Amino acid sequence: MTEKQYEKITVNLPVVDLGKIDYLVEQGFYNTRTEFIRTGIKNEIEKNAFAIDSVIKEEGSKEGSFFAVGVVHLNRNSLERYLNKNKMITLFVIGMCFIAKDVDVKLVSKTIKAFKVYGIKKGPKDVIDYLTKNL
């Protein structure tokens, strides 16, 4: 089993809602505010699973598409394999896409024809900017 990776977010709530959360925590329904919020988010994701499942099915079946739910690591070697085969890929990720420091804009422009990440994008700033603004 892989270890879960967490990303910190900030949530602004009305004070009355926060008070209700604190009350439920104090009464033992949840251990912490964080547990309450995670549970609510998980419930909403499960409630809308059909939307996520349909995009997974659609994107995963496209020719030349590299689709993943989880964490994707791209480095120079992996992209150069596509370059050597004269292939460009469509990259679609739900989770996190991590691009190594050894990847530059020139290589990305020759190997990635479309780029969409729902979640976190990490890597060299110029590469992330290029992918986000141009593809």
Image (cartoon, rainbow, N blue to C red):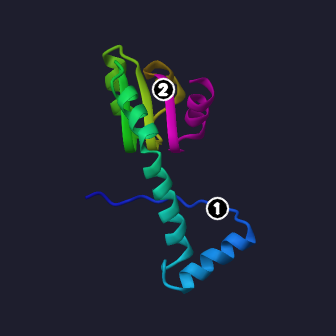
> Counting residues from the N terminus, which is met first, the one under dot 1 or under dot 2?
1
Residue at position x 43%, y 32% from top? Answer: 55
| Left or right for 54, reference 23 | left
Residue at position x 46%, y 38% from top? Answer: 51
Please state the extent of the stretch shown in magenta in the rendering: 113-135
Label 1 and label 2: CA atoms lie apart by: 32 Å
Please state which of residues 103 and 15 is positioned toward the viewer in this rendering.
15
Asked if the stretch drawn in magenta spans residue 130, the answer is: yes
Instruction: Point out residue 63 in the picture as x, y percentages from the top left corner.
Output: 34, 18
Decide: is 58 above or below 13: above
Q: Which mark is residue 108?
A: 2
Residue at position x 38%, y 42% from top? Answer: 69
Asked if the stretch drawn in magenta spans residue 104, the answer is: no
**How packed is label 2: few (under 14 Cα within 10 Å), some, or many (20 or more)?**
many
Decide: is 67 above or below 41: above
Instruction: Point out residue 43 in the picture as x, y percentages from the top left corner.
Output: 46, 57
**How packed is label 1: few (under 14 Cα within 10 Å), some, or many (20 or more)?**
few
Quickly name the residue at label 1.
Answer: 10
Instruction: Point out residue 112 in the picture as x, y percentages from the top left corner.
Output: 46, 23
Residue at position x 43%, y 29% from top? Answer: 91
Element type at mark 2: helix
Residue 99 visible in rendering: no
Residue type (three-letter) at the residue carrying disc 2: Val
Please state which of residues 29 and 96 is positioned toward the viewer in this rendering.
29
